[in-house]
Image: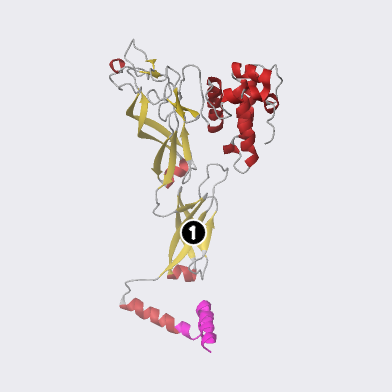
Amino acid sequence: MAAKKDFYEVLGLNKDASAEEIKKSYRKLAMKYHPDRNPDNPKAEDQFKEAKEAYEILSDDQKRAAYDQYGHAGVDQSAGGAAGFSGAGFGDAFGDIFGDIFGGSRSGGQRNNVYRGADLRYNMEISLEDAAKGSETKIRIPVQASCETCSGSGTKKGKSPVTCTTCGGHGQVRMQQGFFSVQQTCPKCHGTGKIIKEEDKCGTCNGAGRMKTNKTLSVKIPAGVDEGDRIRLTGEGEAGVNGGPTGDLYVVIHLKKHDIFERDGGSLHCEMPISFTTAALGGEIEVPTLGGSAKMKIPAETQTGAVFRLRGKGIKPLRSNENGDLMCHVVVETPVKLTDRQKELLREFDTSTQADTGKHSPRAKGWLDKVKDLFE
């Protein structure tokens, strides 16, 4: 069996090291070599055990004195091996390290578990017009607000919380699980170290310090907001716990479906139906915009699917200095509910164009040629 290392050497200390230096060195090594932090390093567990055994001996005055005088022979029997874990000093140090590794904390005095209030979300649906020019509206939201009767203390006037009898005001309780001493949040005071007697609780909030209520807020919607944008109202969320800061309210913007326009960033898109005659001969039509109406010239022989741009007739996005464009998508409308005379005129027109289909209907002629080639 390999000889055990010198305990002072294991902890990297001189023999005149103070109790605080011993504890500090052990905590550093335990955090470095803890098995949970080194799952793929089997040697780390051995180093962790060495440091643990060294600390158990050197943190106990009687065991340290025996070790200083007789070495390992002086503590083998009295220490009961390296797995004693029974010393009060070791329990305290391990509790500190356990908290450092896993996110817990210890305190020799009262814990003031102060928590920030929860953030809230409000979904607001607005029109495209309001998104483009901005607006101001009022909303009503349910929140957890500080109790006005007790000002958030949870106690009656002239009363105050008392020290928790379960944890003695520490906010933590220590439980022994085999060789390990585990520290947990006190289940009675929930870590605050204080409790309110039943007879001292505020009659309005029953000791909670907060109450559900509704409040009305004014929300300014900046011009150019888009789908999914968030407006932050600082301090308008839920009240904090034990005097903690209030959370924030986030108003999330959703755009209502518009009858004419579809938005794409700063651009607006719309379908623009035109008559068969206008498409064939050309002309001028009136196009709607968010700011009124505009004139647009349609060139002769315009086909369905053609897109015309009206520059600057879109929306100025929230983080831009320029307006987007309005994109008008042409749809040639087929006449309906024709009279007999109108039908007769259309047949005459169709007959007049059949003599030279390629000239008057180039797309149809091209398509027919491709079909012919396919079957041949």
Give the percent coordinates (x, y) of residue 144: 36, 28
Taking the image as shown, residue 167 lies to the left or right of residue 309, namely: left
Q: Amino acid at mark 1?
A: Cys
Identified at 36% across, 13% down, the residue is 160
Display colour scheme: secondary structure
**Is 4 situated left or right of 160 in this image?**
right
Q: Quadrant of residue 154?
A: top left
85 vs 89, nearest the viewer: 85
> Where 150 sits versus 231, above or below?
above
- Depth check: give the residue in front, 308 or 174: 174
Q: How many marks?
A: 1
Q: Is residue 125 above or below residue 327?
A: above
Query: Residue 327 at x, y = what percent?
Result: 51, 57
Residue at the spot of label 1: 328
Which portion, as a residue range, is magenta?
A: 352-376
Q: Is residue 283 above or below residue 202?
A: below
User: In this rendering, does residue 304 appear at all?
Assistant: yes
Crowding at dot 1, Cα within 10 Å, few <14 / some 14-19 / many 20+, comes out as many
User: Which element type, helix, strand or loop, lies under badge 1?
Assistant: strand
Q: Indicate left or right for 77 with 147 as reference.
A: right
Residue 23 visible (yes or no): no
Provide the major secondary structure of the magenta segment. helix
Residue 289, position in %: x, y?
Answer: 46, 51
